[in-house]
Amino acid sequence: MGITKSIIKLTAYLMKDKNLSGDCITFGVHGIEGLYNDVKTIFKKAGYKYTKLNKDEIIMDELTQFGKTIHQSVFFKMLGFSKTDSIDCFPDENPSFTLNINYPIPKDFVNKYDCLWDGGTTEHVFNVFECLSNIVRLLKVGGRIIHSVPVSGYINHGYYQFSPILFFDFYNANGFTDIEAVIIELNSKQGANYYHYNPFLLFHMNFNKKKVCLYFTAIKNKVFKKINIPVQGKINYKLPAEKSKNPVKDKLKEIIQFIPFIYKVLSIINLKITIFKLKRKNKLIL
């Protein structure tokens, strides 16, 4: 469980205009791949307005898979959060709270946090529905969820590897908005490739057995009396609006994507060409 340089880089680019602040909680205690100056360099290059820390504020962590690096509290303080708590099932890594998120969290944790960071815990939790439900409970209205989870190529890493549609459907059904997702294609030679993910346009993407992760974020916009269980295919998505270069073409795409049969036939006919074009179009150059 850790926050790699590729995740730090992506976070800096995606969150630089989001004004992250308040109280953050993490599932697990994350190792950070880098020292203070490493993270600072990534933030500067991305144009992220990070919080500068004094030497006495830079706490080190020797319990990570990256060796001796900055503690996660330093990373989240640099992002802009004033406080960072953590939840873990085991006390070994000194979490703020030792809780089993397979079960509902205590009531005094409900609607408490401005951000929840899941940097690779959900796939290890057997009761995924309760885990996701706890995320909804922990966040305030206006609070942000950030997931960084495996999609493919991680056999036996955890109990699960996730299809991105799970998060789109669950969070849409439970009043979350401002949804953004990026597919991270890990490449040992080039580091990582990043692709904007759209559930309508990229459901056929094939990464040829490479390790692939999902970076997903959304904001809690309302509170329901109970956690809603989504039904696949029954959710209407509201993705962040983008400036259109060709409104007529975009409107045609919008109509086609809601006619499943036509869209599926067109996708099958042009599958290989479509995958190539979508990868190229949605690739983020970071």
Image (cartoon, rainbow, N blue to C red):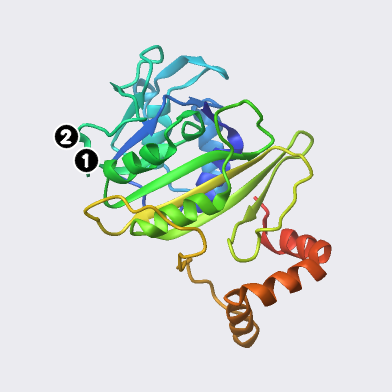
The residue furthest left is: 108
Label 1 is placed on what type of residue?
Val
In this rendering, is residue 100 above or below 180? Answer: above
Residue corresponding to mark 2: 108
Residue sitting at x 50%, y 58%: 232
**Depth order, front residue of 147/226:** 226
Give percent across and percent down for residue 61.
45, 16
Q: Is 54 on the left-hand or right-hand side of 237?
A: left
Q: Are marks 2 and 1 in contact (CB under 8 Å)?
A: yes
Give percent across and percent down for residue 235.
45, 64
Residue sitting at x 31%, y 31%: 103
Residue corresponding to mark 1: 110
**Depth order, front residue of 232/282:** 232
Give percent across and percent down for residue 40.
51, 36
Residue 255 image-quadrant placement: bottom right
Label 2: state its secondary structure: helix
Residue 149 image-quadrant placement: top right
Label 2 is placed on what type of residue?
Asp
